[in-house]
Structure formats: C-alpha cells, structure tokens
Image (tube, helix red, strand yellow):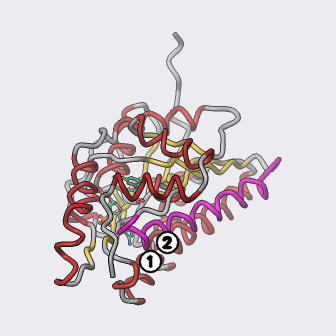
Amino acid sequence: MKKQDNSGIVVLVSGASSGIGKSTAEYLSQLGYRVYGTSRRPRDYPQPEKYALIEMDVRDSASVNAAVETVLRNEGHIDVLVNNAGYGIGGPVEETDPRIVEQQLDTNFFGLYRVLHRVLKEMRRQGSGRIINMSSIGGRIGLPYQGIYSASKFAVEGLTEALYKELHGSGIRVLMIEPGDYKTGFTARREMVVPDELQDRMAQSRRIIEHDEQSGRPPLEIAQLIDKVIRKKYPRLRYPVGAFDQKLSLFLKRILPDSCFDRIIMQYYKVKSGK
Ligand SMILES: NC(=O)c1ccc[n+]([C@@H]2O[C@H](COP(=O)([O-])OP(=O)(O)OC[C@H]3O[C@@H](n4cnc5c(N)ncnc54)[C@H](OP(=O)(O)O)[C@@H]3O)[C@@H](O)[C@H]2O)c1
C-alpha cells in the first residue's frame, strides 16, 4: 500500500496535555502530520519531540487568538482543528451553583466556539478545512449526575449539527466524535459537587460512572478514528465510538419511548428515587 504523505497537513489539537488530545497529537505526529497541541500550562509538561505543545486557554479569546496566530505564523494555514479541550462536573443538577455551571459552559461550549470561530475565519479564507468537535455520548443522552456536563455537550451537538448544514458546499467540513467511556485523566479532573447529605445516595451511581471510565477503552482508538475522518472525502456528521453497549444505547434511544429508555438509564446508574 502507498504510504500517505501527511507532511503538508497542519493540525491544531486543543487540550493535548492529557487523554484523548494527547493521544491524538502523538499519533497524528507519528503519521507525519504537522501537529500543534495546546495546554493552559505547556511548561508543566516536557516538550514533545514530534509536535509543538503551545499555550492556549479556551476560556480566554486573547489566548485563543494568540495560539492560532502562532500556528499561522509558522505554517501559513490550518487544515484540521480537533476541538477537544474539556472537563466534567459531577453531581445533582439542583445542587450545582450557577457559577459552576457557567464555568462548565465557558470551557466545554464557549471555549470550543471561541477556537472554532477563529479557525473557521481562516478556513474560509483558505476555502478548505476540517473541524472535529469532541462531543460525548453525554451529548446525546442526559446522564444522571452529569447533567451540567451533558448540557454543555448537547450545546456542542446543536451547534455542530447546524453548522454542518451552513458549511455545505464550502469546502470546509465539520463533524463530531461522540465517545463513550475512555480511560483518560477525565475522571480525576472531574469537579464533584455533592453536598454531604447526598453523598450516600449518590455513592453507587458515582462508583458506576467512575468504574466505567477507568475501565474504559484506550484513547488511541479515537486518535486512529480522527486520522481516518481527516482522510475521508465525505465524512459523516456524527461518529459515536465506544463499547458495544454504549453504542447500543444510542440506538435504543432512537427507537424506544422516552419513558422506557429513561428507566433503562436510571436502572443502569442505580439512580435512587425519593424526596
Ligand atoms: N474520557 C472520556 O471517557 C470522554 C468521553 C466523552 C467525551 N470526552 C471528551 O473528550 C475531551 C478530552 O477529555 P479527556 O477524556 O481526554 O480528559 P483529560 O485527560 O482530562 O484531558 C483534558 C484536556 O483538556 C484540556 N483543558 C481543560 N480545560 C481547558 C481550558 N480551559 N483551556 C484549554 N484546555 C483545557 C486539558 O489541558 P490543560 O489542563 O493542560 O490545559 C487536557 O489536555 C473532553 O472534551 C471530554 O469532554 C471524554
């Protein structure tokens, strides 16, 4: 088989200091892509050999602009954006302070939008490009005790679904990856918002959520999928990835009445009813 030459393809990966982003930056750079990964604190990490780790905080437009300018100054163009930076909040919706909700949206939704908005301007100028937004299975299913996180990913889904249509025929393609559980730094970094009196009630659900993530699949699988979708001529809008039962749940959500599907999810996560 002919070896692909990726050396002219410039990829910007947000949130590349850990997990899915790091795996993606490593894998794509091994395949010869010219990769720029980002972190809020790149100096906290050893500078990777095959790609650059540059500073970007997606919560700050000036920081986003500076990072994009760095790539453009060095390369002159950006062909692929992997819009990946994000984190989770865990706990009951009603116990989450609105400021914490704003912070979650500020990173997972507005942050993703800040990067997309800046890079898309450049891709319009180029007349080509590919934007890969990192959604989640939680962007298709409202996950109990991850409601704020789910809301941020539902927002990503709505935005991407609309933009997909708006970019039709432009030479630029936008799509989403919807991971189930992958073993990354996500679990350890999750901000938990659980008042003492609810700790016991939530304990079993929390154990299931964390166990599923920590016994999740390797993020390399997503990096390999990203390489495939970059090379696909006509990528789809959505790429769900993960364990069989997680992909099955998306199918069941499509065909079952809400009341029935919600019961399955509540039973799975052992959500306790009560006042
Ligand atoms: N792991 C899973 O099971 C799973 C499932 C579905 C979806 N996802 C999604 O996949 C993406 C990556 O998560 P992961 O699992 O790889 O988690 P991770 O290992 O914790 O990595 C998260 C990355 O996001 C970056 N980040 C966080 N806040 C940021 C900010 N304000 N500005 C810039 N970068 C920021 C972090 O970089 P710094 O801290 O260095 O800035 C880090 O590199 C997230 O969008 C997550 O929602 C993960």
Tell me whether the residue at label 2 lies in contact with that at label 1, contact meaning CB atoms closer than 8 angstroms: yes
Mark yes or no: residue 64 visible: yes
**Mark toward the start of the polypeptide (2 vs 1):** 1
Quarter of the rendering containing residue 160: bottom right
Q: Which residue is mark 2?
A: 111
Residue density around tag 1, few if under 14, some if 14–19, many if 20 or more, within 10 Å: many
Disc 2 residue: CB within 8 Å of ligand 1: yes
Q: Which residues are magenta?
A: 144-169
Please provide percent x and percent y for residue 136. Answer: 47, 54
Give the side of residue 163 with respect to residue 155, left or right.
right
Tell me what residue is drawn at x 65 percent, y 64 percent.
159
Q: Which residue is mark 1?
A: 59
The amino acid sitting under disc 1 is: Arg
Ligand 1 picture quarter: bottom left
Mark yes or no: residue 74 visible: no
Looking at the picture, tell me which residue is in the foreground, 73 or 148.
148
The amino acid sitting under disc 2 is: Gly
Please provide percent x and percent y for residue 223. Answer: 41, 39
